[in-house]
Image (cartoon, coloured by chain):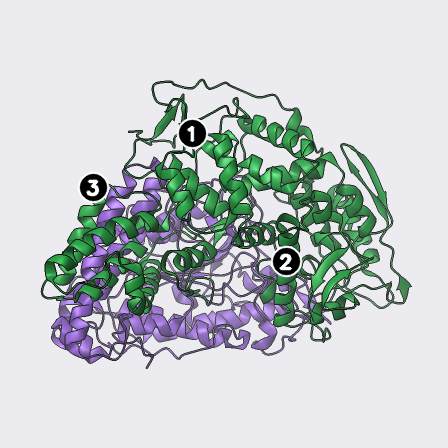
Amino acid sequence: MNKWDIARRDLLKSLGVGAACLPLLRAQRAVAAPGQSKHLMIIQMSEGYRQGDWKPKAGSLMTQTLPFSTAPFEPHKGEMIFLPNLTNPGISAGGHGSYGVIYYGMGSQGSGQYKEPKGKTLDQVVASALPKLASGRPSLHLHVQLELAPRSTTSPGGSRCFWTGAGQPINPVGDPYAVYKEIFAGAAAGNTNVDGASVEKLMVRRKSILDYVGKSLDDFKMRLGTEDRMAVDAHNQSIRDLEQQLQSAGSVGQCGATASPMLDLADRKNYPEILKAHLALMVSSLKCGITNVVTVQTGDSSGNNINFGAFVPGIPATSKNNYKSPYRNWHDLGHNPTMDGVDHKRIVDKWFMERYAELFTTMKSVPDTAGGTLFDSTVILIGNHMQEGANHDAQKNPWMIATGKNGYFATGQCAASDGKPVGAVMSEICNALGVMGPYGQSMPELKKA
Amino acid sequence: MFRPRRFILGAVFAIGCTGSIAGDPSTTPPGKTGPSPDPTTVPGAAPLRRLTRLEYDNTIRDLLGIAMPLATNGDAFAPDQESALSGFVKGAAVTGGSDARIFMVAAEQIGAAIASKLPTLLPCNPIPTATGEQDACADKFITTFGRRAFRRPLAGKEVENLRALYKAQRAAPSSATFEEAIGGLVTGILQAPQFLYHWELGPNAALKDGTLVRFNSYEVASRLSYLFWASMPDEKLFSAAEANELLAPERIAQEARRLLGDAKAKDGLRDFHTQWLEIDTLGDVPKDDTFKDYSPAVAQAMLDETRDFVASIYTGPQATGKLETLLASPSSVVDASLAKIYGAKGPGAVMLGDRAGIFTHLGFLAMKAEPDKSNPVKRGDAVLRRALCTELEVPVGVVVPPVAEPAPGVTTRERFTMHSMNPCATCHTIIDPMGFAFERYDAIGALRTTEENKPIDASGKVSLQSGDISFKDAVELMTKIAQTPEARACMAKQWLRYAMRRRELPTEDAALVNLRDVFQAAGYDLRELVVAVTKTRSFTHRAPSAGEVLQ
């Protein structure tokens, strides 16, 4: 245990809570109508897919065999919707520049290459509409090695795709071990291995300090303009969330959560382990009522920093092109999918689908409190911000939805979504979650008749 | 393929000024301001920005006298992000509990670290033992330390809030000792927005100047210190602010010169130049294993070279201050590892006959290259954007085809020349010749005379508004660029952007014209340019933000 950790039992003791409180936390989760989804999970991919190996034929999935890279979804295809060629209207950006606005769907702002949304993205539309949880985590945002060099840009729109509002990008967390400690191991980021009384003292002091910070933010913003006030409001909300997180730390217990390993986050070989730990954390967080919205960014707008050769079988460790980095990275795969006669991009596409198929299987094994499984009660959106790395087309986005077949969506289809806007899909996701979306569009064909 | 957005350079100074803002004698302090060098400049609103990681660490150092690089070391603090399309960064937005947690943990670590330093921080020595005296000491600490941490005097309510925090810490159930409660105050102050954000207006009414707001003396003090030191004001600046002296451009310039001459200016100068050259992440950039002379430590040495080279131009008895030196000097100071790559006799001061200024230094060349090869597009694009302020952007809907794969017998120039003959030629015929000039330097910046057994051809011609430049290599190119009006104007624009952390507006042309004139009159002395930046209305004024209520 790190010397800054607080032993979970001490924290629980200091808070005067224990396992008996767990049902109370869970009781505050959303009460959903029958068949209504309760959770949203977004997995952000990059550099598109090799379309010929990804896209099924339009129509029922049940009467066809999925192509090469999506073949791992065969056991789940009855609970999936493929959405090829979705547009992202009004963004005036190419495949990289659209990364920051892919879950906004209502245009963009900013004159730079990397666009930014004018308001909150889908995750926050949903998170702010669903009932608040005791955990202080309206949403949980993770990333896999996003910050390793070479980063494509310092522009927020190039590495942030979830936003609480205009100019307010969400900084995802990259260390699954740290997040696991905070949520499930009772580590309230305190200092030293101290006794319960000291922990209690620390918690009380923190509370008074954070109260002071919150008050200061309230006063501070009064002198600012509208946009800056929004930034300070977001800061203030982060303080409130932290307070709640600290208060609830440890009270949820381990809840059967899969413990996250301590990993070297800078070691590119650890990408699969980090992704696996993040996906497990996301599942645990939904299962245990920590949050209703989880996201993971598997790369930034270019993915120059990922070395697929370090962990995907069949991919060489280095690129012949040395495009953007010495690795067989995502951007390199996008522009140069084939090397020495082998299509590496489709192999990488498939590698990810295998991970997500495993995720679906896991979620199907987790019972949901309201009956069914976690998979049934969750809308899983696997998004991408360009059609294919080779064309960087930001107006033909390939998305996938997975969720229980007894819910809102008419699953088991490859939708005739060519030219339909991403906003229409996000509208339907909001509908599935019982949330009023701002998109003003719809795709009734996605809804079960 | 790139589309030229503003390839014709130099037009910036030709644009007429728009609008004229008359001072409002009822709100401008009489006799304090002095004449503005660019009275017709109408600046934009100042973006609220949080301390960058460097600024956070430097401010902690100067505020508390401790070196704890919590923000710049490790990955805890989110990376800085570009501020308002300026090409320079601000601290990342705080939008989630995990962000707030980072500041809390850092503040707690700092609070714990200063426990042994309290006697030097407290205004009472020895530390009193009686509760009443302790409370009085805490009161004094709040106003004195608070003034330094918030970079201006505290409002009455701010004092009350901190006093309440102190009392809450002392009372049950916290029952903190005096020392612990002071630590709690510090921990709270370091998480407060007044510390974390650049917005030092404080309790004072905004100084209206026509339709604009003039930064008050405390705000100017911070703008100066963060511009030159990437840190908080020192006591001399605070004193000048307290005397309300920092409204007059000449007095501001006087302080600017003092700050520029201080050893701490090395930080601000390094920050500007590493951001300007886009080399601040060089230490993380991977290179091919075949480069045995390259390692993270060598990359750091390259950054150190840039820092020391820049410092030698701006500060010290030997400093020339000249733009020409920055862009075309063959001299540098290097350690043994860099001397080896340069092929120079070192360590120490060296004359590099095959180099001309900072764009031919190893740091820039290694950053703007592939892991194993040079990259003319990266180098040419960076020189165009950062040295000449010419920006090109990929048009929407255009697919950028890859450069031809390396092949035996084919040089980088030949590969990229093929690239510029495809439909992307429109812009690559602009970018690539600039980049080809640097072909004599490999992926880590080492000199080479051949590639694929063919002699390197680094010659070419680029067209600027001021005329064509023909060159045989980067030395000749950069030597000539250093003399162009485009490079001189661009340097002024980049410093102004860095100071404002936003893009200039068309209504700020008067400021740029003023900077051009001052720069020219000073024989293109960068020190005079930066000082002149601090006198412009873009530095001393701002437009009210939309929705801002001026009190």
Front residue of B466 and B397: B466
Chain given the colour green:
B
Q: Amino acid at mark 2?
A: Asp
Quarter holding residue A318: bottom right
Residue A299 position in % (x across, y down): 51, 62
Number of residues whose C-alpha sits closer than 10 Å to that of mark 1, classed few (under 14), some (14–19) or many (20 or more)? some
Residue placed under numbered mark 3 in the picture: B156
Q: Is residue A258 visible?
A: yes
Residue placed under numbered mark 2 in the picture: B308
The residues bearing labels 3 and 1 have C-alpha atoms spaced at a distance of: 27 Å
Relative to B454, is A337 on the left or the right?
left
Residue B415 position in % (x across, y down): 81, 58
Number of residues whose C-alpha sits closer than 10 Å to that of mark 2, classed few (under 14), some (14–19) or many (20 or more)? some
* Label 2 secondary element: helix
Front residue of B54 and B136: B136
* Label 3 secondary element: helix
Does label 3 or label 2 sit earlier along the sequence? 3
Relative to A247, is B486 on the left or the right?
right
- With respect to residue B356, does B530 lie above or below? above
Number of residues whose C-alpha sits closer than 10 Å to that of mark 3, classed few (under 14), some (14–19) or many (20 or more)? few
Residue placed under numbered mark 1 in the picture: B543
Q: Amino acid at mark 1?
A: Ala
Which shade of the palette goes to chain A?
purple
Quarter of the picture holding the N terminus of chain A: bottom left
CB contact under 8 Å: marks 3 and 1: no
Residue A341 position in % (x across, y down): 72, 71
Residue B48 position in % (x across, y down): 40, 42
Front residue of B389 and A302: B389
- With respect to residue A392, does A7 lie above or below? below
The residues bearing labels 2 and 1 have C-alpha atoms spaced at a distance of: 37 Å
Residue sticking out furthest to the right: B454
Relative to B77, is B113 on the left or the right?
left
